Amino acid sequence: MAEKASILIVDDNADICSIMSLILKFQGYTVTTASNGLEATEKVREHPFDAIFMDIMMPIMDGVKSCKIIKKMRPEAVVVMMTAYAVEDLVQEALREGACDVFYKPVDIDKMVDLIEGLRAKKQRACFPAVDGAPDG
Amino acid sequence: MNCRQKGNNHMEQKTIENSSLQVLCLEDSSRDAEIIHELLTDAGYDLNMDWTATEKEYVSFLRSVKYDIILSDFKLPGFDAFHALQLSIDICPVVPFICVSGSIGEETAIELVKKGAVDYVLKDRMVRLPFAIKRALDEVKEKEARRQAEDERKKAEDALREYSIRLEEMVEERTRELRDAHERLLSQEKLAVLGQLAGGVGHELRNPLGAIKNASYYLNMVLKESAPEVKEALQILEREVAASESIISSLLDFALPKPPNQRQVEIGLLLQKVLPRIPIPSNIEVVLQVDETLPDISADSDQLSQVFRNIILNAVQSMPGGGKLVVTAKIASTGQLDISISDTGEGIQKENIEKIFEPLFTTKAKGIGLGLAITRMLLKAHGGILLLQSEPGKGSVFTVRLPAGTGEVK
């Protein structure tokens, strides 16, 4: 069986990072956390995560800006934005910058797992991963 | 003699190209009556003269003919000019009365004029009669003109009074409208402030709530084999988190509505997914009827699910003693898509029909009263409307009407 996916959780709320990390680790995923956008970009530079779940409103660097940098660095990166607020402008901007979806808080863990498993299945099926991960124009 | 008694006592008429004159002549001397007739004819009147000497006939003439003038001798068989004058005043008050007499003293004449006669003419100065008549007729005309003018003035005054009343009403109505608009504005401002506050609080609460929700998810996962009490406590935690989430979502949906993310939606499928997720007690029979030929529509499936969930939840809550819930989806005669949710519940009181769509109005012990306001708002964003029929004690039917569209994603 293929190795479990590696996940990056980015949120300035430490409790959210901890509990998501606990859950996903319990389900066998490799989980890393970051407390702001800048920290996230550094972690992504070091490691190509299978999926990145990132809050939008964060100090130091917000999720949208971080997503933009990450997509430049790793165009194949799967970034899912998380927000507690209907910040439509930021959501739209993040989607334009390459975020693949937006989850509204409180994030449904099952939905999160479905997405991760969907990605893995897709990856396994794809003969040419480069085609799969092509960034949007 | 040319004069005749009643019925055939019209004098012969001379056709003169002048004003016609209808005269009643009260005279016991036929000769004098003839003189009067001749005099007036000679003066150019197109004359029509009735002549009598009796009170009975006099009264009968007054009652049956419209005269221009009454000419009366002073002394008559059995009565006099005073009595004749009074009768004329009683029966036809506007017809001028002239006393034509040979034996009238000045005092009597003045007395007659005081009582209402317009003039008196002595028989030995009969030549003055046409002038007296002309003056009397002119006076009548003048009086008539004055009366008409007075009437018109009164009419104008009445119209003015009416207009002024209407103006007052208009001012009152406008004031009422302005007051209502002001109140609406105040209420909107209040709602806007409330919206901002709710948005801020909701946002801040969603993060910790998210952490709690995930923590309970984790505990559920790792404590699979724990004691029933622990499991029950975890279920309570989950239920209450879900309830809090729902309150916050309502506040945020209302305060900061998201534009619909439109995709192709199959309504039948959506309803089949929504229904099982709603806790419906077993004493409520659920019927879902979906027209299989329904076209897909372009809509935000999450928002539409919320619309149906809100309405169905209300329907379920209106039937605490059980009942029947019928959800039907079909094409309306107008070509739009109609999804009706009918219940056999308590129904809505007439005075609450409009209010239930107002934000913060609720008839329930629990709930903040945003459900239907949000429902209507979400439908509006989809170009749809919400219709309601309700009968207290019998139940309600909410109909969601959506534009059918092509089902293509925008």
Image: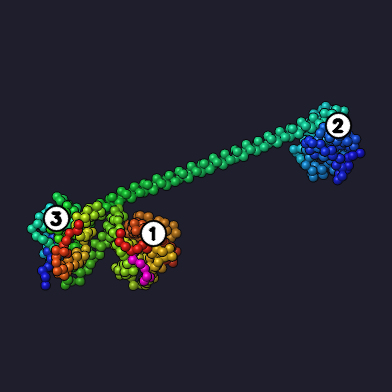
Residue numbers of the magenta segment: B290-297
Outermost residue on the right side: it is B1
Label 3 or label 1, whichever lies nearer to me, is 3
Residue A72 numbered mark, or none:
3
* Relative to B337, B152 lies left or right: right
Label 1 or label 2, whichever lies nearer to me, is 1
Which residue is tagged 2? B101
Label 3: which secondary element: helix
Image height check: is A114 above or below B97? below
User: Mark 1: which amino acid?
Assistant: Ile
Q: Is there CB contact under 8 Å for labels 3 and 1?
A: no
Label 2: which secondary element: strand
Neighbour tally class for label 2: few under 14, some 14-19, many 20 plus, Cα within 10 Å: many
Residue B296 magenta = yes
Residue at left 69%, top 35%? B145
Image height check: is A44 above or below B64? below
Q: Quadrant of residue B139?
A: top right
Tell me, yes or no, whether dots 3 and 1 are on the same chain.
Answer: no
Answer yes or no: is residue A40 visible: no
Instruction: Name the spot of residue A61 as percent of width and height, x first.
Output: 15, 51
Residue at left 38%, top 64%? B337
Label 1: which secondary element: strand
Residue B230 magenta = no
